[in-house]
Each structure stands twice: as structure tokens, then as C-alpha cells.
Amino acid sequence: MSKKLEAGGLGDFESLVKDGAVDLLNYLEAGNFSGAISVIQELSDARHKSFYKEVGTLTRSLHDAIRDFQVDSVDLAVEGSVGDSGTKITDASDRLNYVIELTNSAANKTMDMVDNSLPVANELKIQAKDLRKDWNRLIQRDLTPQEFRELYKRIDTFLQYTENSATALHSNLNTILLEQGYQDLTGQVIARVNDLIRDVEERLVHLVAVAGRVDSISGIEYEENVPEHDDTRGHGPAINKQNNPEVLNSQDEVDDLLSSLGF
Amino acid sequence: MKILIVDDFSTMRRIIKNLLRDLGFTNTVEADDGTTALPILQAGSIDFLVTDWNMPGMTGIELLRAVRADEKLKTIPVLMVTAEAKRDQIIAAAQAGVNGYVVKPFTAVALKEKIEKIFERIDAAK
């Protein structure tokens, strides 16, 4: 797409308006009203022509942007999750859903392993504590021969249990470790979606520039009206907290604020 | 002591549930936003409410305000556990009558501390 040509279109119109203004003044000063009216008519025609031209450019740019979103979805493809239909945007949204699923599954599997391990660790603690009581009595030679025989057996059982528990804990910890692989996969997906967003933003900036020319020719003006985000709906986790004095950085700062409010 | 945990992410509910269990609170119920939480609260028997802020449907702050506006529910202690950390939001929560505010990501110690503090205050007021 030739930016020079588009800019030229608007530039031509602007110089036409300037020249027309001079002509118009000259006609008016000379008292030539029909000449003046014809200048106004010419300007109006030129404005219409430029307007339609710019709208045409805008439409083409929009069309190009939409078309570009659709091509190349192959380079974003992971595990055949992308069909033939759909744009990069729906693809990106699929991808982000994949991130949600993957993080959800990793978090749940990790918690399963923790749920699985906690009772094992707890049981080890209880048995060891129990054994140590009698072990101390043994050291102090405070056991009857019958109790000693029992302790002898219990220690054997405990050692067996410890070995099995350690194996189970080891395997659970390994599973937790492997589950962290989600970070790699989701990181890659998010990086790609990030690229797409940057790409889309660039195209949108271009579209805004083209649309701006249409506005300037048609004389449309907009009220700048950025609605304040409602706190009630929430903002989600704060990123770049250090740069925002409105956002507190830690639980300590929250506690300080609350205590300053009389909490 | 029956505790209602309100968060739209099931993993977060599970984390909070496990931490509460570690603290000796084994009787918990879950809801995924304010809209589903309110009927559970209104059915009675909930003694403590732990809620997120940012949720679809009814948010945590709206739930808090609804609880405080309800004659039957207004004395239930409410602990907010949320990623929302804007000064104005914390002030709004305080004004709405929150009993504690924990920012995510949080530690088990922070959660324990806030819950204990809330109970200390309740006991002191008795």
C-alpha cells in the first residue's frame, strides 16, 4: 500500500482549499459573487471526491487487515489445534484457553500430589514419634523383654514403612517437578499471542491514521471520552506495581493502610 | 465453624480450602461468585466468609455490601483474598466493612495471621 499516494490525496485537497480560499477572497473583494460561488462549488466537489477516496482507502486497509489476520495461522499452530477456518484472533483465543486449561490441570495435579503426600508425611511423623518414646525407654533400660521383642518387630515394620513412604514421596515430588513443564508450554503460547497483539496494534494504528484523514476531510470531531475503569469490577493482578503509586506492593503495605484506617 | 470460600478459580478455592484445613477448619463450602454465594449464605449456617474480589457475575465487593446490608448476615466476618491491590479498592473494602484483606499471591502465614486476628477481635468484642 502506498502511503505517499494516500498522503498526497489529502495534501492535494488541503492545497486546493488554501488556493480556493485565496481565489474566494479575491472574487469577493472584486465583487464577483458568481465567481465566488463557483469556487465554493469546486471546493465542495473536491471535498466529496477526497472523502470518497479516503473512505475507499480506509475500506481497503480494513479489508487488508482482516485478510492478514487470516493468513499464516499455520505459523501459530500447535498440536493441530487450528482448523482451516478461523482467524488469528480466534486462534489466539483458543491458545489462551489452552493456557488456562494447562495451568489449571498443572495446578490440580500438583495439589493432588500434595494431598497425596501430606498424610504420608504425617503418618511418618506419628510413627517416628511413637517409636522414639519406646526407643528412649530402651536406652534407659526401662523395657521388659516382651516389650523389647515388640519394639524389635515394630522397628522392622517402621523401616519398611519409611522405605515405602520415601519412595512414594519421591515419586510425588518428581510428578510435581514434571508438572512445572506447563510454564514452558504456556510461556511459548503467550509469547506468540503477544506477537499477534503487537501486530494487530500496528495495523490498528495504521487504520486510525487513515480514518483520521476521513474525519479531517468530513469535519467530524469526537469528544475525548475515556471512561474511568470501575473499581467494583476489579482490575485483576497489578502488573508493574512499582510504577503505580495507586497500587500497593505487599501485604505489609495493605496492613499499614488498613491500620491507618483504624483496623 | 462452617466457612464459605468464594473464588471463580477452582484451583484457588482448593488452595484456600487446604490451608484452612491445615489451620483446623475442615468444614468448608465453595461458590464461584457472589451470585452463587448469596443463596448459600442466606440458607444460614455459614460462620465465616472468604471471598475473592474479581469474579464474573457478582464481584466480591458487591457480595460484601450485600452481606452487610442483610439483617441476618451482616455480622458474618468477611476476609477478602484477592489480587486487587489498589489503594482506593482497599479503602472501599474497609468502608464496606471487610474484616481482613489478604493480597494474592499470599502465604499460608499471612492467611493464618489474618484469620486469627479476626477471631481475636470477635472474641474481644464479646
Image (cartoon, coloured by chain):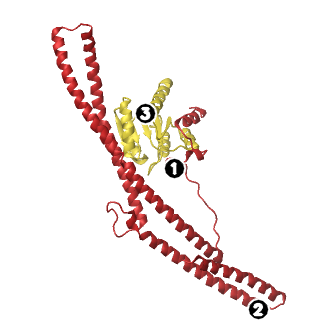
Chain colours: A red, B yellow
Residue A97 position in % (x across, y down): 38, 56
Give the left or right position of residue B2, taking residue A165 as reference.
right
3D distance between C-alphas at marks 1 and 2 = 61 Å
- Name the N-terminal-most of marks 1 and 2: 2
Instruction: Name the residue: 30% across, 42% down.
Output: A175
- Residue A23 drawn at (x, y percent): 77, 87
- The image shows residue A107, relative to residue A259, as above or below, that is below
- Front: mark 3 or 2: 3
State the residue position of label 3. B108
Is A13 situated left or right of B25 in this image?
right
Name the residue carrying label 1. Answer: A235
Q: Amino acid at mark 2?
A: Gly
- The verdict on a common chain for dots 1 and 3 is no
In the rendering, at what x and y percent does residue A202 appear?
Answer: 54, 66
When asked about the image quadrant of residue B108, the answer is top left
Distance, label 3 to label 2, CA atoms, is: 85 Å
